Image (cartoon, rainbow, N blue to C red):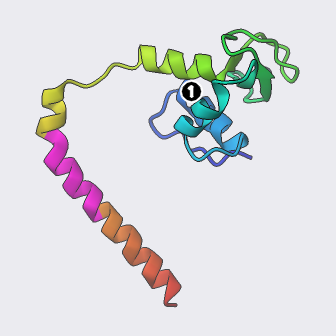
């Protein structure tokens, strides 16, 4: 069972993370690196989440589980996600950087504190 939480992610992003998890990779970069040298690569059904091995350029492979042609190779999924996700402008990054870093540091402190509290009980 997947431990990927969808939060604010698109279905495509969630499926990509689920595929990463199912294949035992910590992140999408590792999945990408392991997939680029083979004639087939990990793929996931965008409908039901079933995983398979497909050709690297596959975007509509047949799913054995749900019977739909919605299996997408990880390379296609990564490419499609990258090409359809807008980058943020540099000025947005510069304006928000300080407050986001402060927020991140506070979050990290809280996580460490809660870990230490649990560990010391
Ligand atoms: Zn399916």
Horizontal and vertical percent position of residue 92: 16, 31
Element marked by disc 1: helix
Please determine whether, in this image, residue 17 is positioned above or below residue 87. below
Please determine whether, in this image, residue 71 is positioned above or below residue 97. above
Q: Does the residue labelled 1 lie within 8 Å of ligand 1?
A: no
Choose top left, top right, bottom left or bottom right for residue 45.
top right
Horizontal and vertical percent position of residue 22: 72, 41
Horizontal and vertical percent position of residue 76: 60, 16
What residue is rendered at 58% in x and 30% in y? 32
The reply, left or right, for residue 61 in relation to residue 88 is right
Residue matched to label 1: 11
Magenta stretch bounds: 96-106
Query: Could you tell me how many numbered marks the image carries?
Result: 1
Choose top left, top right, bottom left or bottom right for residue 62.
top right
Please determine whether, in this image, residue 116 is positioned above or below residue 47. below
Instruction: Determine if the magenta segment contains residue 116.
Output: no
Horizontal and vertical percent position of residue 67: 85, 14
What residue is rendered at 64% in x and 44% in y? 25
What residue is rendered at 43% in x and 14% in y? 84
The reply, left or right, for residue 41 in relation to residue 79 is right
Quick one: which residue is furthest to the bottom in this view?
Answer: 121
The reply, left or right, for residue 5 in relation to residue 40 is left
Q: Which of 114 and 60 is in front in this view?
A: 60
Quick one: which residue is furthest to the front in this view?
Answer: 37
Q: How crowded is mark 1: few (under 14 residues within 10 Å), some or many (20 or more)?
A: few
What residue is rendered at 39% in x and 73% in y? 112
Q: What kind of secondary structure does the magenta stretch mostly adopt?
A: helix
Q: Nearer the viewer, residue 9 or 31?
A: 31
Q: Nearer the viewer, residue 25 or 35?
A: 35
Q: Quadrant of ligand 1?
A: top right
């Amino acid at each position: 069972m997947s431990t990927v939480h969808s939060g604010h992610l698109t279905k495509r992003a969630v499926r990509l993370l689920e595929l990463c998890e199912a294949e035992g990779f910590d992140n999408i970069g590792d999945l990408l690196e392991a997939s680029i040298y083979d004639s087939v690569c990990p793929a996931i059904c965008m409908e039901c989440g079933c995983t398979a091995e497909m050709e690297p350029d596959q975007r509509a492979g047949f799913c054995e589980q749900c019977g739909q042609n919605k299996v997408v190779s990880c390379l296609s999924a990564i490419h499609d996600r990258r090409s359809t996700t807008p980058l943020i402008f540099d000025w947005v990054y510069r304006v928000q950087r300080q407050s986001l870093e402060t927020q991140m540091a506070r979050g990290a402190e809280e996580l460490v504190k809660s870990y230490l509290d649990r560990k010391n009980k």
